Image (cartoon, helix red, strand yellow):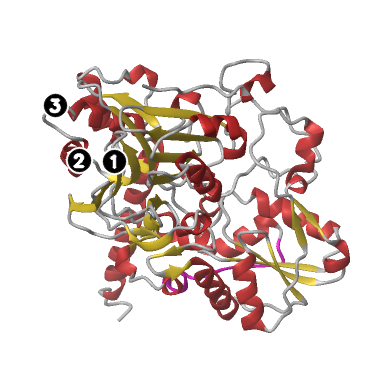
Amino acid sequence: MIVAKDTGLNSLNGTNSAPSVDAAQPAQPADRGYDDHGEQPPREECGVFGVWAPGEDVSKLTYYGLYALQHRGQEAAGIGVGSGDQILVYKDLGLVSQVFDEQILNSLKGHIAIGHTRYATAGGGRWENAQPMFRMASDGTDVALGHNGNLTNYLELMAEAAEKRLVNPADEPSDSDVMCALIADLIDENTSMEDAALQLFPRVKGAYCLTFTDGKGLYAVRDPHGVRPLSIGKLANGWVVSSETAALDIVGAEFVRDVEPGEFIAINEDGIRSRKFAEATPKGCVFEYVYLARPDSVINGQPVNATRVDIGRRLAEEWPAEGDLVIPVPDSGTPAAVGYAQASGIPFGQGLTKNAYVGRTFIEPSQTIRQLGIRLKLNPLRHVIEGKRLIVVDDSIVRGNTQRALIRMLRDAGAAEVHVRIASPPVKWPCFYGIDFPSPNELLANNVDPDNMVEAMREEVGADSLGFVSTEAMVETSAQPRETLCAACFDGVYPLGLPAGNPNAEQVRLRQRRLAEEAEQAAGGSDASSNNPEEN
């Protein structure tokens, strides 16, 4: 049984339908003020959470867990609760605190719960794509599933589900819905949830961390590459699975270990059980350490905050600058700014105040509001920065609109110089494994002279100087072996392959071929020159 309701948040728009996330924006005024063109930071697309705890208020534990994972998805949230015979699912568009209240949580009774926070991918900002997904097996078993990641063989799996009439391709079902449908289809009187999962997941390709339930047990799966983090925690009377360890801390669970790449976990009254469904070939996302994960989380034994502070120290060594004050772009730039200040000896200060309550809005912005742009999110402390040579530390540059607007705002507030330091290498490639990066053609690094990239990017954003931490330094600060990390967004090497039928993936394939041809031509020209007797 499923109860999956619209909470009524959409009535703010005067309609019960999901608001469009692709609505046309008003024409821009000639003077854009501090307009950052609505640029969003790189976005993790989901967070997952699960609890098995008889006698505990599992819906509220899951609510608090999702609250701790809110940064991983701010467009939709949902909780599914199992009590043995049935699963109740409640989900809607909005923040966790907007979707759930005391009355709703009190109605979700059971001893198992899974939860999900979601960012929408392109065209996916619909209520139907909010999670957990729900399906019913032929034997009446309820199945609820939450997924973090992206599949590279989605079209293949969707075709299989469509052939079985489990989904309609015209409805553009998400990869999460397809997986849920295929698992439910495998379950019958002779095939348990565990058996069904172990049949399906060896055939699933890409990045995926899942929590799911049949109302009797809590289950978790992590893909063989371990692209996204997933951890296990112990409660006094139960178990927790979470995308990040910070959420374990919030609900009072003791960290036990990470779910291994290629591992299936089952939790019920008999305890916790592990099965390997594929050989582990780790390729963890390095951007989790740089930006995506909470700084108070730990990934593969490495504290995220420590990595970011170390990146700042390396950034100061690789890109020193003369300045009076090091300031972060809060909050993601703060640890690296602390490290930069420590290594450089330049004082650290808070020169920008962040509005913690600015997030996704369903209200169409006016031209006047759009001119305010970044000032809705950040406001300079004039008395701190006026007359100062600033070193501004940020986590990344994607399109460059945010940095351009920020630098203009700092200069207008009296900054004498603005030197920008970035705690990651230039982002040059899109992600197909769970981060919502723009298309390759929208990335600033791909729209400047590649032979003079950093200087050209500096001119584009209007900084006095610009520097990026090296890939080598970034990898070293993660404390992980290079061969166990995915850095595709920086180096264009996609260890899990590229998805079929994806326009951005086609752009990547064309660019990879062009770069390979250029490298081959350059190598051929070099060989020809070295063999030219007139030059020897």
Instruction: Name, please, the residue furthest toward the left.
Output: 190
Q: In the rendered structure, which amino acid carries the disc numbered 3?
A: Glu
Identify residue for label 2: 194
Q: In the image, is 361 to the left or to the right of 161?
A: right
Judged from the image, the secondary structure of the residue bearing numbered disc 3 is loop
Whole-number angstrom distance, CA of label 2 to CA of label 3: 13 Å
Query: Disc 2 on helix, strand or loop?
Result: helix
Q: Secondary structure at mark 1?
A: loop
x, y percentage for residue 477? 46, 73
Q: Which residue is mark 1?
A: 217
Q: Earlier in the sequence, mark 2 or mark 3?
A: 3
Task: Give residue 384's quadrant in the image.
Answer: bottom right
Closer to us: 272 or 412: 272
**Residue for point 33% across, 71% down:** 481
What's the CA distance linking mark 1 and mark 2? 9 Å
Question: Which residues lie in the magenta part?
Answer: 463-475
